[in-house]
Image (cartoon, grey):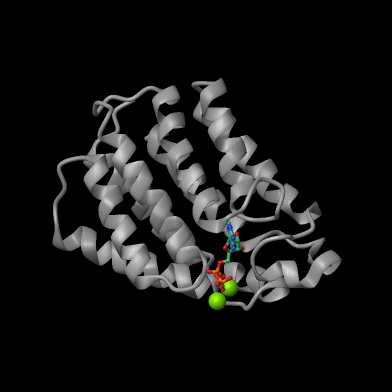
Amino acid sequence: MKFGADEAVAWLIAFQGKVSENKTYLTELDQAIGDGDHGINLARGVKELANVFEASSFESASDVLKAASMTFISKVGGASGPLYGSAFLKMSMKWKEVDKDITMSELASILQEGEESIKARGKADVGEKTMLDVWHPVVQACSESDDADHFLQVAKEAMEGTKEIRATKGRAAYLGDRSIGHIDAGAMSSYYLFEALNETIKE
Ligand code: ADP
Ligand code: MG
Ligand code: MG
């Protein structure tokens, strides 16, 4: 599949649309088991990112992800800003190793860099009710199948599955058992990111 600068911009603009549209929902999810700012945090970041995309042009997907990283790190507060920011940065670095035409397994290795950097920065692992519970199965799915609808389906189930998990990382961890029964806000926003990726690939 072709995945150069234009496709990377299209991906993140699609993500922007989903985050803006669902800003209230993301905030409600975070209100239930966090501090209720996830939608606000991310909406600020993606809006700023759209401004960056309008003002500049990019040579490669790597450059686009680097700009996204800098914007998220500088403009998005909370835990999620640095987590998405570091994921985009590591993905940007990995993207330098591939051509404009990438295979699904190359995409898997790029997304895996993102997953690893979230793990490292968040000192978290799979099963703690965070965005990682979506990132990890999506990376697996991309390495298993070339079908973009496969990783989308996996992402959806994983996002919904965070409802059943008891949080041990992030603000929700303070609630212990009371964190069960709610979808994790960061898992939801990560689902939007992968839904946007699926749409970009299928364009
Ligand atoms: P904050 O919790 O600082 O208000 P946000 O509300 O923007 O930040 O983001 C919260 C989301 O970030 C959570 O729903 C979770 O998915 C993710 N998150 C929080 N802490 C961690 C962590 N240590 N590791 C991985 N993800 C985390
Ligand atoms: Mg929050
Ligand atoms: Mg906060």
In the picture, the quarter occupied by the N terminus is top left
Judging depth in this view, the residue of 1 and 81 nearest the camera is 81
Picture quarter with ligand 3: bottom right
Q: Looking at the image, which residue sits at the far right?
A: 177
Question: Residue at image x 59%, y 40%?
Answer: 136
Expressed as whole percent of the image width and height from the top left, the position of residue 187 reads: 61, 54
Q: Which quadrant of the structure image shows residue 174? A: bottom right
Seen in the picture, residue 105 relative to 69 is either above or below; the reply is: above
* 66 lies left or right of 152: left
Q: Can residue 25 be seen in this view?
A: yes
Question: Residue at image x 61%, y 68%?
Answer: 25
In the picture, the quarter occupied by the C terminus is top left
Seen in the picture, residue 92 relative to 38 is either above or below; the reply is: above
Question: Residue at image x 44%, y 56%?
Answer: 84
Q: Is residue 6 visible?
A: no
Seen in the picture, residue 198 relative to 100 is either above or below; the reply is: below
The tally of labels here is: 0
Expressed as whole percent of the image width and height from the top left, the position of residue 156 reads: 64, 44
* 14 lies left or right of 58: right
Question: Residue at image x 30%, y 69%?
Answer: 48
Expressed as whole percent of the image width and height from the top left, the position of residue 100 reads: 24, 29
